[in-house]
Image (cartoon, grey):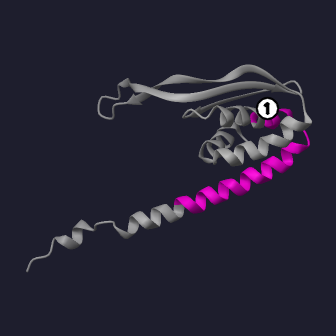
Amino acid sequence: MEPRRFSKIIEKCLAERVKELARPIVEQHQVTVIRKPAKTLVMVRMRETVAKAEFYLGELLAAEAMVELEGAKGFSLLMGDDLDKAFSAAVLDALRRSQLPQWETVRLALEREEERQRQEERREICRHNASRVQFNTLDVEY
C-alpha cells in the first residue's frame, strides 16, 4: 500500500479503530519510541488562485509521533490533538514498512475501512444533492 493512500485512510479512520489495529502489534513486538507523541503546530500553505501566489493561511494543531519496529521506522502527523491515535498510526506505518506477517491482516482491514469511508462519502454527497438548487429552473417567465 502506497504511503499517500495509507495516510488518507488513517486520517479519516476513527481513533478507536486505529488503536485497535495497532494494539496486537505493540503487544507482540518491541516498539521503540523515537519521538514521543506530542502536540505541534503546522503552517497551512495555500495558493491564491488568480496570481498563483503561495501564502500561509495560519497554523493547524497536530499530533505527531515516530517509532521503530523491527528496524523499520514509522511516522505519523495527524490533524488534531489525539496523541494515542498518532502513536498507533506511527506503529501501523512502521508495520507497513517492515512487511512483517501481521501487515497482511492490517492491510486488509484498512482496505475494508477505505471502502466504508467511500460509502459514507457517497451518502454524504447524496444528502447534499437533495438540497441542491438548480438555478436554470428558476429562470422561468410567468
Q: Quadrant of the C terminus?
A: bottom left
The answer to whether 117 appears left or right of 31 in the picture is: left
The answer to whether 50 appears left or right of 18 in the picture is: left
Rendered location of residue 65, percent (x, y): 68, 26
Q: Which residue sits furthest top?
A: 34
Q: Quadrant of residue 69?
A: top right
Rendered location of residue 37, percent (x, y): 67, 25
**How many discs appear?**
1
Residue 102 visible: yes
Q: Main secondary structure of the magenta part?
A: helix
Rendered location of residue 130, percent (x, y): 38, 70
Q: Residue at x 61, y 42 (%)?
A: 11
Residue assigned mark 1 = 94
Q: Specify the segment rendered in magenta.
A: 93-121
Q: Is residue 115 above or below residue 134?
A: above
In front of the other: 73 or 60: 60
